[in-house]
Amino acid sequence: MKKKEIKILLVDDEPDILEIVGYNLSSEGYRVSTAENGVEAIQIAKKEKPHLIILDVMMPEMDGIETCEKLRANPDLSNTLITFLTARGEDYSQVAGFDAGADDYITKPIKPKLLTSKVKSLLRRLKEQDEPEDDIVRAGDIIINRDEYKIIQDGKEIILPRKEFELLSLLASRPGKVFKREDILDQVWGNEVVVGGRTIDVHIRKLREKIGDEHFKTVKGVGYKFVQ
């Protein structure tokens, strides 16, 4: 996918942030839209279906966490990448962000070149998705269609956010194999993306809730494995 085809929605209540970050992303060739609050962001996202949403946490009318949850509840936006860009760097705030369905959490202030690099890293998966691939993984009662980003369990389709899908796809690709935490971060999030220490734990917990606790086993001090 070419840069000019990639749509990014930037959401922040600070005009300076919208102007500076929007300018830098536009200069890279991306199609950038802006919103000043969560309510406006949801309206624009439904209409434009952006590939990436960059979201502030502290905003009027609707904060970023609630906005992210509402965006993730929309099936049409299930494959949209969402990253927070916020001055709040506390661990509990980051956990809340990932728990709401975010793909990454970037702390302000950040240099424009570094932000651009992180955006490129997040968008790499869009390029990979452009390549046709008919890849079906069958693991117990679960069928994973990597090409169509579909999960079928006992005949019922389950919609997962992109990161949860990729994590499940990785673990289920080799049932019984223990995937180390560092390998999971590398293969699902990529080396260039900085994520909180509890990111994997949060995503595993959400998969347990949706797919079934019996399918995931924690190997203390090492990582996780998928059980059929």
Image (cartoon, rainbow, N blue to C red):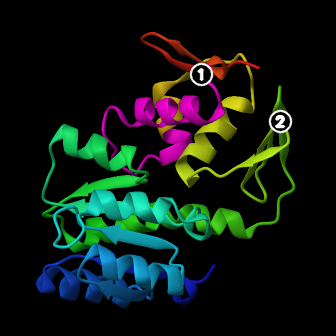
Residue 94, quarter of the rendered image: top left
Residue depicted at 56% across the width and 53% down the height: 161
User: Is 30 above or below relative to 94?
Assistant: below
Quarter holding the N terminus is bottom right
Residue depicted at 54% across the width and 44% down the height: 188
As drawn, the label of residue 187 is none
Q: Residues within 10 Å of mark 2 (few under 14, many from 20)?
A: few
- In the picture, measured across the screen, residue 2 lies left or right of residue 137, that is left
First in sequence: mark 1 or mark 2? 2
Q: Nearer the viewer, residue 68 or 134?
A: 68
Q: Position of residue 42 (x, y in %)?
A: 40, 76
Residue depicted at 43% across the width and 53% down the height: 103
As drawn, the label of residue 213 is 1
| Circle 1: residue type | Asp
Residue 149, quarter of the rendered image: bottom right
Q: Nearer the viewer, residue 54 or 63?
A: 63
Check residue 204 for magenta coloring: yes
**Bounds of the magenta span?**
186-213
User: Is 124 above or below relative to 146?
Assistant: below
From where the camera sits, is residue 3 visible?
Answer: no
From where the camera sits, is residue 165 visible?
Answer: yes
Q: Nearer the viewer, residue 200 or 213?
A: 213
Q: Position of residue 224 (x, y in %)?
A: 55, 21
- In the picture, measured across the screen, residue 101 lies left or right of residue 208, that is left
Rounded to the nearest angstrom, the CA distance separating label 1 from label 2 is: 16 Å
Residue depicted at 54% across the width and 79% down the height: 49
User: Is 100 above or below relative to 2?
Assistant: above
Q: Position of residue 182 (x, y in %)?
A: 46, 29
User: Is 149 above or below relative to 92?
Assistant: below
Q: Which residue is mark 2?
A: 154
Label 1, secondary structure: give it. Answer: helix
| Circle 2: residue type | Asp
